[in-house]
């Protein structure tokens, strides 16, 4: 997601049953499953059971700070898995205050349906990586019993190290090892070892995520280190090519790049270490590891180290370039966006950087895209065609930064693997952000607003519930077979040269196919603003 300095993204919050399974036994307090590290006791909730707070790696604390995850120690007796483990160190997503969470945070949560699997085969496994800009969020926020029960799937939600703890780099580290992605790989290895114990199929694992979670999925698609750990992928509002132009949200912001060269991250780490009094020629990491977590978890450091680094053996190439070159794992992919992605971010900066009229609109286009491209942009997005200048600006930014880059990646993917594209289009989706309303910029189908249709977050009306059932059916159908098909729902066509995208909205005709490239002026953006991120 765009890195808006000083503005905390509310989508950071955005954002099973007595088990009759192999290795499972029902106890008086809840079902027990024997994992490779020891047995865990979950909780029964009627149609599903949950096993929460299961450690999938050793705590990355003390001397393990900024080290690759190590196996969790075995435990004696039955471990209670009735509540989530600690969230990783992060800043509060809402309001002010200091850091919350713990460095001892590498836990995951498993949700499984009641009873035996619907078919003869084990259930598909879906592993969720949360969003939050890589500096906030946790797996336990997402309650996945809808896809688990309706889709007869095992769903796993994962914590991973955030900000300066997860994406730090330094010369003494040999660059930027990407601890956040390494944590996710450790969770996937745990799934490969333990999925069958919960009734899941370790040979049928789907990774899915939104925002930073989607960028994570993108990285795993192009990382040699992630080979064989998953078999399908869903990328929600965070394609390999996601980016925003300079000054799009605030005048002082440069181009947002979710993936940066490891050497840059290591240089930033050396500078940060010096500012913290650890700028010595050797032993800088020992000095930094001796610092309290609160000293490190500042807004500057948590957001400065919130981008994924590439240029080493685990992620050799910038992911968008890897896709273009065909260097990615050959698994089916679903990719998509919301219709009004940028409205969530823009609404938080309009008071400080308003768009009052056509003059402000023109100034913004010129500042972000240059004078020549600005003229072409204004012709395609005339301010007079929109209710307010702010809506005009949000529309073109959503197309340039999210929708068209996603379709561009889809074009690269579809040459090699089955690829499906969607656009979440419910502009009456419930607002669960807690943000004050901005009259000139209703949030509509903003970034993360599809999440309540997949997870239990906020109540939906009847029509939205029906849409949620169909979306859950598509997602779990894809996890089961590699084809996003749901009973009674319209057919979802594979992405082809015509860029047919499935638009998802409530109502009798709410699910329909649209021409994504044409509706979102992608020819313009492919010509005028396609290659804006840093070369490797």
Image (cartoon, rainbow, N blue to C red):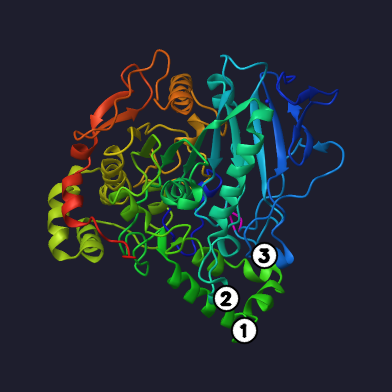
- Compare residues 31 and 430 and report the one nearer the observer: 31
Which residue carries the number 3 mark?
Answer: 65
Q: Left or right of 209: which side holds 445?
A: left
Tell me the SS state at disc 3: loop
Among the two numbered marks 3 and 1 on one chain, the one whose residue lies closer to the N terminus: 3
Instruction: Specify the quadrant of the image occupied by residue 331.
Output: top left
> Crowding at label 2, few (<14), some or many (≥20) Cα neighbours within 10 Å?
some
290 is higher (above) or lower (below) than 250: below
At 50% across and 26% down in the image, what residue appears? 460
Which residue carries the number 2 mark?
Answer: 172
x%, y% of residue 104?
72, 55
Distance from Cα at disc 3 to Cα at disc 2: 13 Å
Callouts 3 and 2 close, C-beta under 8 Å? no
> Crowding at label 1, few (<14), some or many (≥20) Cα neighbours within 10 Å?
few
Quadrant of the image containing the C terminus: bottom left
Question: Does residue 438 show up?
Answer: no
x%, y% of residue 302?
56, 64
Instruction: Specify the quadrant of the image occupied by residue 47.
Output: top right
Which label sits in the foreground, 3 or 2? Answer: 2
Residue 153: in magenta span: no
Which residue carries the number 1 mark?
Answer: 282
x%, y% of residue 473?
46, 22
At 46% across and 60% down in the image, what residue appears? 313
- Compare residues 477 and 276 and report the one nearer the observer: 477
Instruction: Specify the quadrant of the image occupied by residue 170.
Output: bottom right
Callouts 1 and 2 close, C-beta under 8 Å? yes
At 20% across and 60% down in the image, what residue appears? 362
At 68% across and 25% down in the image, what residue appears? 16
Distance from Cα at disc 1 to Cα at disc 2: 8 Å
């Amino acid at each position: 997601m765009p890195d808006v300095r000083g503005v905390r993204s509310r989508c950071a919050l955005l954002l099973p049953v007595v088990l009759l399974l192999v290795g499972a036994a029902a106890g008086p307090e809840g079902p027990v499953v024997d994992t490779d590290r020891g047995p865990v006791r979950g909780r029964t909730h009627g149609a599903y059971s949950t096993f929460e707070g299961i450690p999938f790696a050793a705590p990355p604390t003390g001397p393990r700070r900024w080290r690759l995850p190590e196996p969790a120690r075995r435990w004696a007796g039955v471990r209670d898995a009735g509540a989530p483990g600690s969230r990783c160190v992060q800043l509060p997503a809402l309001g002010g205050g200091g850091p919350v969470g713990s460095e001892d945070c590498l836990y995951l949560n498993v949700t499984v349906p009641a009873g035996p699997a619907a078919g003869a085969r084990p259930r598909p496994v879906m592993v969720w990586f949360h969003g939050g800009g890589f500096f906030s969020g946790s797996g336990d926020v997402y309650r996945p019993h809808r896809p688990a029960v309706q889709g007869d799937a095992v769903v796993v939600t994962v914590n991973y190290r955030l900000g300066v703890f997860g994406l730090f780099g330094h010369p003494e580290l040999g660059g930027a090892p990407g601890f956040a992605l390494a944590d996710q790989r450790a969770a996937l290895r745990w799934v490969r070892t333990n999925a069958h114990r919960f009734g899941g199929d370790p040979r049928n694992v789907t990774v899915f995520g939104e925002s930073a979670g989607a960028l994570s999925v993108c990285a795993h698609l192009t990382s040699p280190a992630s080979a064989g750990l998953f078999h399908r992928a869903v990328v929600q509002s965070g394609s390999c090519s996601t980016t925003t132009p300079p000054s799009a949200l605030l005048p002082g912001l440069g181009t947002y790049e979710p993936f940066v060269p490891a050497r840059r991250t290591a240089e930033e780490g050396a500078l940060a270490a010096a500012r913290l009094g650890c700028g010595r020629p050797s032993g800088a990491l020992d000095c930094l590891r001796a610092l309290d977590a609160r000293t490190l978890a500042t807004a500057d450091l948590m957001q400065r180290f919130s981008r994924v680094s590439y240029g080493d053996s685990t992620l050799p190439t910038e992911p968008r370039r890897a896709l273009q070159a065909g260097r990615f794992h050959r698994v089916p992919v679903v990719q998509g966006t919301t219709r009004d992605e940028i409205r969530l971010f823009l609404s938080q900066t309009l008071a400080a950087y308003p768009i009052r009229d056509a003059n402000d609109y023109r100034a913004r286009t010129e500042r972000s895209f240059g004078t020549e491209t600005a003229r072409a942009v204004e012709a395609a997005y005339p301010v007079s065609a929109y209710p307010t200048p702010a809506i005009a600006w949000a529309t073109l930014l959503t197309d340039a930064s999210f929708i068209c880059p996603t379709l561009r990646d889809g074009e690269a993917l579809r040459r090699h693997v089955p690829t499906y594209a969607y656009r979440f289009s419910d502009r009456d989706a419930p607002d669960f952000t807690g943000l004050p309303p901005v009259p000139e910029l209703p949030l509509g189908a903003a970034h993360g607003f599809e999440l309540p249709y997949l997870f239990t977050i906020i109540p939906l009306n009847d029509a939205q519930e029906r849409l949620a059932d169909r979306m859950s059916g598509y997602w779990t159908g894809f996890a089961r077979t590699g084809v996003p098909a749901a009973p009674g729902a319209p057919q979802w066509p594979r992405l082809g040269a015509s860029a047919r995208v499935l638009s998802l909205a409530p109502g009798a005709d709410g699910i329909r196919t649209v021409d994504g490239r044409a509706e979102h002026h992608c020819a313009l953006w492919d010509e005028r603003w396609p290659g804006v991120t840093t070369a490797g």
